[in-house]
Amino acid sequence: MENPEVPKAPKKSLLNTLVKIVLPLLLGVAIVYYLISKIDPKELWAVLKSANWAILASSLIFGLLGNTIRGYRWELFIKPLGYSPKVSVLNFAIYGGYAVNFALPRAGEIWKCGIIAKEEKIPFVKLFGTMVLDRIFDTVTVLIICLAGFLLNMQFFIEQLQHNKSTLDLIIMILKSPVLYIALVAAVITTYIVFKFFKENVIVRKIKEFVYSMINDMKAIWKMKTKVRLLLYTIGIWGSYFLYFYITFYAFDFTADLGITAGLIAFALGSLSMGIPSNGGLGPWQLAVVAALMLYGVSELNATAFATGVFAVQSVWVILCGLAGIAILALRKQKA
């Protein structure tokens, strides 16, 4: 007999499943198919076989290092709120979260907050706020990397635009278009109307409560005395991620001599592409890296082989580390 006091879990709608799972996967598969459809599989495999797989394998330690430093930075965000989580638990949750993202885009962020909330007895809302702040720091860092890459390659990009007048004309047309600015103003006005006249709406109230809570938490975090460590950890995270990517250039003859500025541009575009919901970057990341390499004269075949090989090796590594993290957390729970 069913207990009437226990509410039934709401059924997931077909639309919700489609948007969260099917569409990102289809997008990734479609992009990968587009990239390899024009290439002979035998030629692609020949390029991949010629790669130095020892160098590819050596890059993996830097991916793990970056994710490990991320755990120490997350601890800095949480401590000012009055909680002292174990860094090891934060790290295992971070590893697991990246693996979960391969199954369900963006779900890893929610999953790791849920795990830490249970393991360390910290309110989920507090953790989610620190995760949002963590992502804000990452976004700012990626934008700085993109700016640095552009400034270091400014003359190169100017020459590219001069040779591709249609692209330059399109950029100018978008910037001059009143539609862009009308849309921005309309978005601001719509947001104001919703929060001004529909403030009693349940969803609006929840959003406001979350925003106010996060603002208060950010004030507490701003007062922390470890700002230098925060900066050093951020540099450590993204420095490790860059090496994780750039070392792979030396695994292929056609990228080994491109130089660090080319690596920075490819890394920046790849990092930006991770903002598109996808299964661990499947599709958008490869497309961004292929486009970046082709800017520097790498053939489409070689660029696609590079993106395919690096993504495959590093994805397997992320999943293995994630599964290990999930397993360790499960064992710790059993022993507790």
Image (cartoon, rainbow, N blue to C red):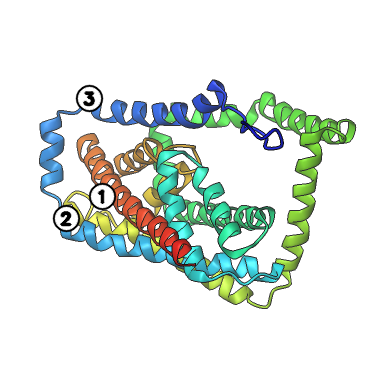
- Kind of element beneath mark 1: helix
Q: Which comes sooner in the sequence, label 3 or label 2?
A: 3
Location of mark 3 (residue) = 38
Q: Is residue 138 left or right of residue 281?
A: right
Location of mark 1 (residue) = 313
How many angstroms separate mark 2 from mark 1 (CA)?
Answer: 9 Å
The reply to whether callout 1 and callout 3 are in contact (CB within 8 Å) is no
Q: Could one spot residue 24 in this view of the protein? A: yes
- Kind of element beneath mark 2: helix
The reply to whether callout 2 and callout 1 are in contact (CB within 8 Å) is yes
Within-10-Å neighbours for mark 3: few <14, some 14–19, many 20+:
few
Residue 160: quadrant of the picture? top left
Q: Which comes sooner in the sequence, label 2 or label 1?
A: 2
Q: Residue at x 22, y 56 (%)?
A: 56
Q: Nearer the viewer, mark 1 or mark 3?
A: 1
Q: Amino acid at mark 3?
A: Lys
Q: Is residue 85 left or right of residue 35?
A: right
